[in-house]
Every structure is written in structure tokens, then in C-alpha cells.
Image (cartoon, rainbow, N blue to C red):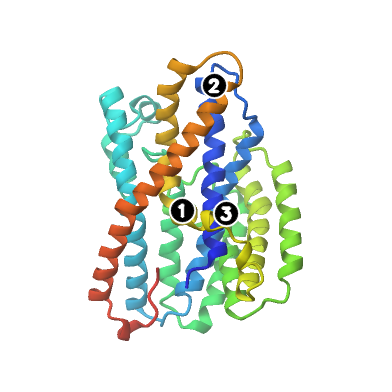
């Protein structure tokens, strides 16, 4: 059963990230006179919301799978077929853009400064392998963290049910130790550093929410919602996303992670009690369905809109900026809907057929989605 509240939050997360990047694109192409202030950079916290949602969903749909390698294999098959095809689609579009613009499908200037081979960079970007540079399509850094979480979660599925919660707890303790020792920096460049990165705690916050709700702990939903909203306001006011230091990952984790965990707990608990379903916008739920495509495509779409729009219509005053923001946002959302309908859904159906073939239901039980 689809949780409408979670899908709506996915849609909100994608919009938040898009708004933060709209600020940057508008500032770049409107000759330094944007109408979106730097406060919109807080929309980057949509990534933190995505991470907490991922941890929650994994426990919600797959946390009670039987122990053993077949459950782990099915889980990873489901996640790989969900993540990679759409990633490859938009990575390919980005490579085509770079090839058309600069003659090579990567940022050769940046890679030269970092001493990284373009071929190696492209290979590791394709397969979301951590290394010293952001992927060719930079938003893919979050998918590297997602895949690491899925891998650790798959390993935990090897354990009997009674040992899984202690395993999550041990992972959290190791991350806390890593934060105290400052093992990881601003960017995680290896599988080891990804697993110990502060933001991995956000996945585990989502796991904690999933465990609580699967155990029918609904009593604190109202105070949790109030606390989460207050915490979120404080986080927005205190975290400076323009200050790119090694401490930023830790700051955003403890500022936004608990806020989003409390909000997810409250909204899902209310939905289970049928207390908020009539207030959940169908448009936001639909946008949640499109959120993965929107997340990966919006930079390409809004940048293309800016390159076409401002040389023709740009001028003094805010009217051209308002028109650009509306055009770019609408274009990105419509494109993501097309991508979801024409590509994502077809890939999902094909993956479902393959999963049924290779992982019969009666051999494992509940299948991940």
C-alpha cells in the first residue's frame, strides 16, 4: 500500500532541491540581479529529507524479509533496477551536453586540477563508485550514498530479525565515533568514508521511524509533528549552506535529520489512523511519483531554459526573472512527468517481471519495492 504522506514528502523534497538550484542558475544568468535570495539555498535540505525517507521506506517494505542471502539478493536487485536505469538516462544526457559543448563527456578542466583520468571518472560515475570527484552529473553524489546504504541494509538482511536492531545501533555508534574523530571530510571519496559519513545517520533516523511505526507506536504523533516543525524552522535559520566546510555535513545531519524524522513519523502515524488523508494533496502525491526524475533532470532543464531565455528576454526589472522562474519550474516538472510515464514506469514493469522470475514469492516472502 502506497503511503500518500511519504509520496507527498518526496515531491516536496524534489521541489526544495530544485528551488535551491534555481537560485544559483538565476543568479548566474540574470547578471547578478536575482529575485531569489540566498535563503533559498536551504532547499538543499531536500536531500536530507530524501535520505530519511529512504531509511524509513527500506524498513517499511523490506525490514521483515526472511534472513539469508536470497532476501539480500532480491533486495539489491530491486534497488539496482530502480536506481541505475534512470540514473543512466540523465547521466547520458549530461554527457551528451558536455560532449557537444566541450568535446569530451566530462569536465576536463576540473579533472585536470584534481589529477583524475576522464575515462576513470566516467566509468565510476556510470556505476556510482565513490572517488575523488563528484560524478559527471553532480547530483549523483547522493545516489552514491543511497547505494552504500542499500548495500549495508542488504548485509543486515542476512541476519535473523532479533539481531537487526543491534546491527543498526552498532552502525550508528561507529558513525558517531567517526564524527568525533573527524575521519571523513566535506566529501566522501571511498565506500568506507561513505558508510561513516555523518549523513548516513539520516538513513538510520529513517530506520528508527520505520521500526517504531511497524511496532504500532502512534501515540506521540501530534507532539512529534509540533516538535519536528519547530526543529525544522530552527534548522533553516541556523544552517548556512553557502559555508562549504568539513563541518557542514555534521551540522545539516543533526539540524535537519531529526526534524524530518519527527515529521515523517507524525504524518505516517496520522495516515495510519486516517487522520490526515483528506488533507494530502493529490498533486503532491503525483509529484512524489515523479520525484526521482525531477531530482535528476531539473539541473539540465532549468539550465537549458536559462541559456535560451535570458539572451532573448532578459532585461532590467524583475518581470523577466519571474517569467524565467515560472517557465523553468514548469518545464522541469512537466519533463519529469514525461520521463516517469515514458521511461520509469516501463523500466519498473520490466524489472517487476524479472524479479518475479528470479525471486519467486513463495521462496522469500514480501518483496521490496
Q: Secondary structure at mark 3?
A: helix
Of marks 1 and 3, the one in the foreground: 3
Q: Is residue 364 above or below residue 143?
A: below
**Of callouts 3 and 2, which one flags the residue occurring earlier in the amino acid sequence?**
3
Point out the image quarter for the C terminus: bottom left
Residue 228: give x, y in percent of width and height: 71, 58
Mark 1, Cα crowd under 10 Å, few <14 / some 14-19 / many 20+, is many
Q: Which residue is mark 2?
A: 320
Q: Tell me what residue is drawn at x 60 percent, y 19 percent.
A: 33
Q: How many angstroms separate mark 3 from mark 2 (CA)?
A: 32 Å
Q: Which one is nearer the viewer's eye here, 90 or 320?
A: 320
Residue sitting at 56 percent across and 31 percent down?
23
In the rendered image of this protein, does residue 367 appear above or below residue 44? below
* Residue 203 showing in the rendered view: no
Q: Residues within 10 Å of mark 3 (few under 14, many from 20)?
A: many
* Mark 1 / mark 3, whichever is N-terminal: 3
Q: Which element carries disc 2, helix, strand or loop?
A: helix
CB under 8 Å between callouts 1 and 3? no
**Helix, strand or loop under label 1:** helix
Q: Are marks 3 and 2 in contact (CB under 8 Å)?
A: no
Residue 363 in the image, given as x and y percentages of width and height: 31, 85
| Residue in the image at 55% along x and 41% along y | 186
- Residue 95 position in % (x across, y down): 30, 35
Mark 2 or mark 1, which has the lower sequence index? 1
Taking the image as drawn, is residue 280 in sight?
Answer: yes
Residue 333 shown left or right of residue 43 in the figure? left
Checking the image for residue 49, the label placed there is 3
For discs 3 and 2, the disc positioned in front in the rendered view = 2
Q: Which mark is residue 145?
A: 1
Q: Is residue 262 left or right of residue 360?
A: right
Looking at the image, which is closer to me, 68 or 290?
Answer: 290
Amino acid at each position: 500500500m502506497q503511503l500518500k504522506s511519504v509520496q507527498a514528502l518526496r515531491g516536496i523534497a524534489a521541489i526544495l532541491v530544485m528551488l535551491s538550484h534555481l537560485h544559483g542558475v538565476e543568479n548566474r544568468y540574470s547578471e547578478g540581479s536575482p529575485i531569489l535570495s540566498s535563503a533559498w539555498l536551504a532547499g538543499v535540505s531536500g536531500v536530507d529529507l530524501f535520505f530519511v525517507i529512504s531509511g524509513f521506506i527500506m524498513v517499511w517494505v523490506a525490514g521483515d524479509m526472511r534472513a539469508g542471502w536470497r532476501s539480500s539478493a532480491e533486495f539489491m536487485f530491486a534497488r539496482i533496477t530502480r536506481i541505475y536505469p534512470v540514473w543512466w538516462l540523465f547521466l547520458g544526457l549530461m554527457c551528451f551536453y558536455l560532449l557537444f559543448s566541450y568535446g569530451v563527456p566530462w569536465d576536463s578542466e576540473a579533472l585536470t586540477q584534481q589529477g583524475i583520468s576522464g575515462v576513470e571518472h566516467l566509468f565510476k560515475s556510470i556505476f556510482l563508485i565513490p572517488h575523488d570527484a563528484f560524478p559527471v552529473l553532480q547530483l549523483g553524489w547522493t545516489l552514491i550514498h543511497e547505494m552504500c546504504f542499500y548495500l549495508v541494509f542488504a548485509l543486515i538482511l542476512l541476519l535473523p530479525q532479533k539481531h537487526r536492531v543491534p546491527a543498526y545501533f552498532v552502525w550508528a555508534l561507529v558513525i558517531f565515533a567517526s564524527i568525533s574523530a573527524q575521519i571523513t571530510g566535506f566529501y566522501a571519496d571511498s565506500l568506507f568514508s561513505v558508510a561513516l559519513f555523518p549523513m548516513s545517520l539520516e538513513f538510520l533516523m529513517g530506520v528508527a521511524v520505520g521500526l517504531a511505526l511497524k511496532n504500532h507506536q502512534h501515540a506521540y504523533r501530534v507532539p512529534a509533528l509540533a516538535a519536528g516543525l519547530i526543529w525544522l524552522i530552527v534548522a533553516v535559520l541556523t544552517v548556512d549552506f553557502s559555508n562549504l566546510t568539513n563541518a557542514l555535513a555534521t551540522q545539516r545531519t543533526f539540524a535537519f535529520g531529526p526534524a524530518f524524522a519527527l515529521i515523517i513519523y507524525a504524518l505516517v502515524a496520522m495516515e495510519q489512523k486516517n487522520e490526515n488523508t483528506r488533507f494530502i494533496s493529490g498533486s503532491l502525491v503525483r509529484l512524489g511519483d515523479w520525484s526521482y526524475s525531477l531530482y535528476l533532470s531539473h539541473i539540465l532543464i532549468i539550465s537549458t531554459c536559462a541559456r535560451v531565455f535570458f539572451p532573448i528576454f532578459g532585461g532590467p526589472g524583475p518581470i523577466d526573472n519571474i517569467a524565467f522562474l515560472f517557465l523553468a519550474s514548469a518545464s522541469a516538472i512537466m519533463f519529469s512527468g514525461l520521463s516517469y510515464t515514458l521511461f520509469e514506469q516501463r523500466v519498473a514493469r520490466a524489472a517487476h517481471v524479472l524479479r518475479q522470475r528470479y525471486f519467486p514469492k513463495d521462496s522469500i516472502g514480501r518483496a521490496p519495492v
